[in-house]
Amino acid sequence: MKFLNVIFWLFIFSMPVSATDSLQWLRDDSRSKTDVLDYLHNENKQTDAFKVSLKSEVNTLLNEWQNNQPEKSDKPWKIKGNNEYSITTHKGQRQLVTRTLVTKKVTPLFNISIRSEAFNYYRLGGWALNNSGTALAIAEDITGSEQYKISIVDLKTNTITALIDNTEPNILWSNDDRSLFLIKQEKQTLRPFQLIQFTLSNSQSHTVSEETNPTWLMSLYQSSDHRYAVIQSNNDNSSEQRLLNLTNGQLSEPIRPRVKDVEYYLDLAHDKVFINSNVVNKRFALYSVSIEHLFNPDYWKILYLPTDKKPLKDFYLFASGAVISVGDGQQAQLIYLDNKGKTRHTETITTSGQVAWVSRVGDYNSNAFYIRSMSMIQPPKWEKVNVSTLNRHLYSQDKYPNINPSHYVTEQILIKQNGGELPVTLAYRKDKLSTKSPVFLYGYGAYGVTMKPYFMPQILSLLDRGVIYAIAHVRGGGYKGEAWYNAGRGINRQHAADDFITAANAMHHYQQGSHDIYALGSSAGGTLVATAINQQPNAFKGAALNVPFVDVVNSMSDTSLPLTLQQYSEWGNPTIPEELASMKQVDPYLNITQQAYPPLLVQVGLHDRRVPYWEGAKYLSKVRAMSTATAPYLLATHFNQGHSMDRREALTQQAFEYSFLLSLTHN
């Protein structure tokens, strides 16, 4: 299995500041300096004053969303052994619950609603029930910093005992229930670097393995054969894996020694190992080998070699055979293999403008998984697949009382540009479309991540107000596969900005109209949008940036930061003159110049460890000082949040963002 999320979710934790940067005083690693906090609070006061004019629209949006809750369909549960598990609303509160496959009797395990009341910010990360079903291990983030604390819930008494902090959210039990296997973080950088075994009887931990290369990260996951876990070290283009025996705690030697640009991701069941690897010609293929010969690559046998147009994405193991996921953002397919590796069945699970993916995979013996599918105007549905019979049927579909999909249109257009055809997925309401309809254009374009056209009822509120909502699938993202990603990362970062500007200009003339463009971007998407605004500010009438990464050169110049070294291929290596020159051309903060900037809303989280608050604060302050326009430039700092919004506040913040942009359409 390919686990790139370790890199994607753990990006930048602290940033250097140039000695000539007049705004360097806004950086406070302690988040406690009076002058900095006063500045942020004063900025919030200005933003709050602007909010007064938006209050009616914000409340209207929130009421719409509150009154348009979906009719609750039966959400699939995750199958493990003879039980199913789900985080769902049970007796009016959000809880982790379980039920037996036979009787369907529901038993609460952990009340998330009650637990979260004690904290201003709360996120339940991983959880793991022990084999005897008497104790639940949980990982909690209570600040937004993504520094997880591990605790044990005694399911007989409901008492919670804190064990250890500064860990990753993933948890595995030893097979005898006496210890936990965890990944420890470095305190300063939060780099996941150490596999530890924590013994419950004496609250002691010992190091099983440590990743000493500061450019590599460590992670773990359980294999389909529950006797083993897979321990992984990786950077952004290479990986190395070992097997951890969950019975005796023994860790194997690397399956293959690490080699630059070679990745492999394995799973195993019943002493047979399946491996997704690009070991040959840098092209991912599915291999199989017996566990006896796993460490000898001469025994690796190719089970499936995909075509260039349908790259291998992932695979899943079941008693009746493997299921392979192939394709890109434009089309997704599933290929079913029997236990001898022969193809049983192939099916396409997406149509144009739609997104679908494998979700809620049952364990090996369940022979069951679910397909989740939707479009920007079609509410999500779940389909259940029986791997043994290949039967696929509708399991449930969300229904919204105030949404009629027939009122809306979604389509994907292809825009001609130097890199080929640029896909843009868009949606609008039929009776609201005009030649002057404003366009809200969203972009991301980094880490090979595919920005999919998900269904969000909040977006339909925009369509109801005459907005065209569009997603630009720019280079640097993964919408068209690995080559599309490589064409927009590192020294090719300008291509992503070119694509976003191209999409904005094309959407301006959509259907022979003259549409104003408003941009949205989060995190690395903030890099994209801010770069595009620097280079063509008159293409945009406004923008909303959420936790934006906008100080690229300063960040990537600090070689003491492990994750900075690791990200050179994504953002460029400033120690190489040619790459530094390329980075400087697209750095949003360095390229703020004296010109008319459109209105901006920048939202940051004080405890953000990926993109620290001072990036957005510095950027907004510099734009305000340099812009020849007077339109509002607003900074909102969320003092109880990190990179991700607290789910309890998410809709309010989204309503503010949308109301800000909608207010600009009336000017």
Image: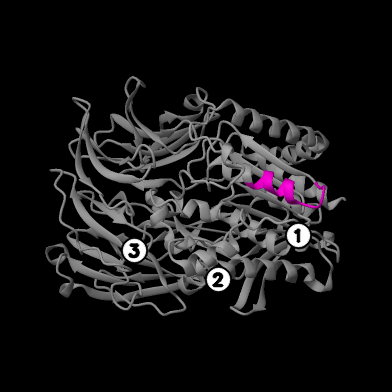
Residues under numbered marks 3 and 2 in contact, where contact means CB atoms less than 8 Å apart = no
| Secondary structure character of the magenta stretch overall | helix
Task: State yes or no: residue 630 in magenta.
Answer: yes
Q: For the point 18% across and 71% down, which residue is it? A: 297
Q: What range of the chain is rendered magenta?
A: 619-631
Residue 388 — which label? 3
Lower position in the chain sequence, tag 1 or tag 3: 3
Q: Mark 3: which amino acid?
A: Ser
Q: Mark 2: which amino acid?
A: Gln
**Quadrant in the picture for residue 591:** bottom right
Residue 540 — which label? 1
Residue 330 — which label? 2
Q: Nearer the viewer, mark 1 or mark 3?
A: 1
Q: For the point 58% across and 58% down, which residue is it? A: 587
Q: Position of residue 31 (x, y in %)?
A: 52, 31
Lower position in the chain sequence, tag 3 or tag 2: 2
Task: State yes or no: residue 355 in magenta.
Answer: no
- Front-lying residue, 343 or 151: 151
Q: For the point 34% across and 54% down, which residue is it? A: 215
- Horizontal side, residue 319 vs residue 651: left or right: left
Q: Mark 1: which amino acid?
A: Phe
